[in-house]
Every structure is written in structure tokens, then in C-alpha cells.
Image (cartoon, coloured by chain):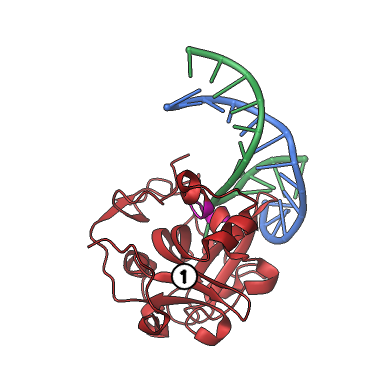
Chain colours: A red, B blue, C green
Amino acid sequence: MPRTKPPRTSEIRPLPRAFFARDPRKVARQLLGKILIRESAEIRLTARIVEVEAYLGEDDLAAHAAAGRTLRNSVLFGPPGHAYIYFIYGNHYCLNVSCEPDGQAGSVLFRALEPLEGVGEMARARKLDLGATNKWQLTSGPGRLCQAFGITRSADNGRDLTSRASGLWIGDDGSRPRRVTITPRIGITKAAQLPLRYLLTSNPFVSRAR
DNA sequence: ATATCGATTATCT
DNA sequence: GATAATCGATATG
């Protein structure tokens, strides 16, 4: 059955750290249908994860971990379940969650969300006039969803996404995706053929192929 | 409808 | 100095 109404807060439980201490491909697949939550005294934003990509360890030439550990990518090599945020093209932030056990690199990139709660706030953050027709523009892309959620590297890199207390976390409301499509990753030049992009089949909130 | 391009900066060669 | 896990705008069919 379609989920048109937002889940109740009490029904959403944080994903445990063990969920992320695995192969990014498995984490990516299972993150579909989960919920990204930003909450504070002033704001509550929730959105369902509808599109992600897996980035593997140092053997994955498309991954930031490919060149080994640096100051920028150190979160990738740390404990699982933490936010790795990077700045790209002089304009945009992108959000990953670290995977694999501590010491081993790997992550999942958040590419698109389906907005649930706080749509007005997201539109304000995106500087968009919200109409029924353009709701998908809020969070259909890795840069867009970060802007909608106010995610920046300085504020959020390294944040623990398994803790409600962190104010940015990933929850499970018990829903299970109906059908999943797997395609090559988008926007990369190296290892571009690997099928590591996971999305909810026919979901209108996924990003458009570029 | 698709194609191309400029913005703007952290990071790496 | 070149590149980049992008986006939004403009040009063209």
C-alpha cells in the first residue's frame, strides 16, 4: 500500500551501527525506503530514501577512498554510520554514510529523497516557490537534498547518523520497498560501468539521468 | 525533447 | 594548473 501519510515519530527507530558495518552494496540496497531525519528545537525535516549509490574501498577508482586516507576523506576510514560530506564543483555538498568496520573504507551516497515532513522549510532552503508540480525538485539530486536539509561539511561532516541526539539520523519506520532497480552510477568517469546505483523502481522522486 | 556550458572552490598533481 | 560522486540556465531540433 502506498504511504501517503508521514510516519509517526515514535514509530521510527534509528538504524543500529551494525547495519552500516557491512559491504556498501548491501547497505545501499537496504537503505532504500528508510528515512533521513533532521530535527532540532526549531525544525523537523523527514524524507524517504529513494536513490543511493555504493562506493567501495580503495579498489574502487570512482571512490574518494581510492587515493588512500587524506584529511578530506578520513571519515570514510573511520567507524560506520557517520556522515561523510564533501564539497564539489565549487557549489554543492553531497552526503554519504560511512560503511564497513572501523579502519576500512566504503560509503553510500544519498542521491534522492521523497520529502515527507517540513516541505515548506525545504522549499525555503532551496529558494524555490513550491507547487504541486515541482515538489520533486526539492531533493532529487545529491546537491539538492543537502541544500534542502541544510547539510554542510563544516556543520555535519563526521556526524553520527545512528543517534537521535545528533539531530541528523537515519530511521526505519518498518516499510519495505516494493521493487528496486540497479543501474550504473551517475556523473563519474572512472569505473563508470559498475552497477552500483540503487533506486526504487518508478519512484517519481529519483534524480534524472544527466 | 536533448545538448552544452558557466559557476566557483577544495583538493590533488 | 586541472579536475570534480552537480545544478541551473541557455541554446537548438
Q: Is residue A153 left or right of residue A161?
A: right
Query: Which of the 4 image quarters holds residue A178?
Result: bottom left
Q: Residue at x 33, y 62 (%)?
A: A4
Amino acid type, label 1: Leu
| Residue in view at x 63 percent, y 76 percent | A42
Task: Residue C2 in the image: state x and y as whole percent.
Answer: 69, 40
Q: How many residues crowd around disc 1 within 10 Å: few (fewer than 14), some, or many (20 or more)?
A: many
Tell me the SS state at disc 1: strand
In the picture, the quarter occupied by the N terminus of chain A is: bottom left
The location of residue C13, given as percent across then percent down, is 48, 12
Pick the front one: A98 or A51: A51
Position of A205 relative to B2 (above/below): below
Residue at the image position 56 percent from the left and 60 percent from the top = A120
Q: For the point 28% across and 71% down, which residue is it?
A: A175
Q: In front: A186, or A103? A: A186
- Across the whole image, how many numbered discs are drawn on residues? 1
A122 within the magenta span: no
Span of residues in magenta: A138-143
Quarter of the image for residue C1 reads: top right
For the question of whether residue A93 can be seen, the reply is no
Chain holding disc 1: A
> At which x and y percent is residue A152?
65, 66
| Residue A67 located left or right of residue A91 | left
How far across and down, in percent of the image, does residue A206 sit? 41, 51
Q: In this rendering, is residue A99 above or below C2?
A: below
Q: Which residue is mark 1?
A: A36
Is residue A31 among what the camera can see?
A: yes
